[in-house]
Image (cartoon, rainbow, N blue to C red):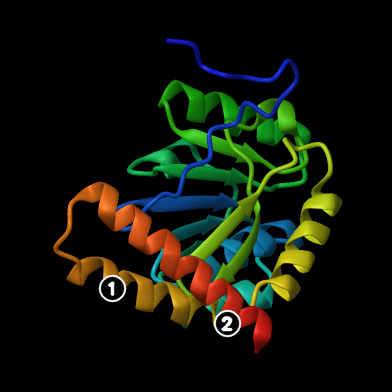
Amino acid sequence: MNIQTQASQNILLPLFMKLDGHRILVIGGGKIGLEKITAILRNDPSAALTVVAPEILPEITELSAQYDIRLHNRPFETDDLNSISLVFAATGLADVNKIIHAESRKRSILINVADTPALCDFYMSSIVIKGDLKIAISTNGKSPTLGKRMRAFLEEWLPDSIGEVMERLHRIRNNMKTDFEQKVTELNRLTKVFEESNKGS
């Protein structure tokens, strides 16, 4: 079996992770920490987060009153990693971030260290959300600015009605009694019809 690859390509594995049953640790209560928190909550408002930092922005405190966010107003401690599934290190202190990275690795916890690609097990993507449609854009950490521009382009290009189209296709798919190949053929035909109707609207 031959798996097709390119000589130079982004080898990151794109995953869409269910956050229920997981707690995320954000270490850092400044602007970068706030950016990570809002990105997580934008994707899943029910996400469970713990924030640890000696100083925490008022905006983060406000969010903690609305969402499942535990605040610890103090420096990082290794016990903070207990029962954690993902870590975001955003302290702004390289030495501290390296310690957090090392301790996370000891526990086989995936970690993202802000502005330090070499210490990241994963990156946050630029995200386009249109109802149930979610598109993640990765530049392999090389150009977040390009990723943001691609997101803006897709947000403008994709019609807001795409979510409704997906819901209609989902209902049709569930009601079909045909075999798999016929179902794929019919869904492809309907998708093309919906595409043409959106162009005309």
Asked whether disc 2 touches disc 1, contact meaning CB atoms under 8 Å apart, the reply is no
Quick one: quadrant of the C terminus?
A: bottom right
User: Could you tell me which secondary element the residue under label 2 belongs to?
Assistant: helix
> Residue 56: where, in percent of width, then height?
65, 66
Location of residue 5 (image quadrant): top right
The residue nearer to you, when weighing 70 against 8, is 8
The amino acid at mark 2 is: Ser
> On the image, which quarter does residue 126 sit in?
bottom right
Residue at left offset 57%, top offset 19%: 4
Question: Is 147 left, or right, of 199 in this rendering?
Answer: right
Residue 133 sits above or below residue 19 on the image? below
Q: Left of 91 or right of it: where is 80?
A: left
Label drawn at residue 172:
1
Label 1 secondary element = helix
The reply to whether residue 167 is in sight is: yes
**Residue nearer the viewer, 160 or 179:** 179
* CA neighbours of label 1 inside 10 A, class few (<14), some (14 to 19), many (20+): some
Residue 64 visible in the picture: no
Q: Which is nearer the eye, 106 or 188?
A: 188
Packing grade of label 2 (10 A; few <14, some 14-19, many >=20) is: few
Instruction: Report the residue at 23% width, 49% height from top.
Output: 180
Q: Where is residue 2? Give x, y as percent.
A: 49, 11
The residue that mark 2 highlights is 197
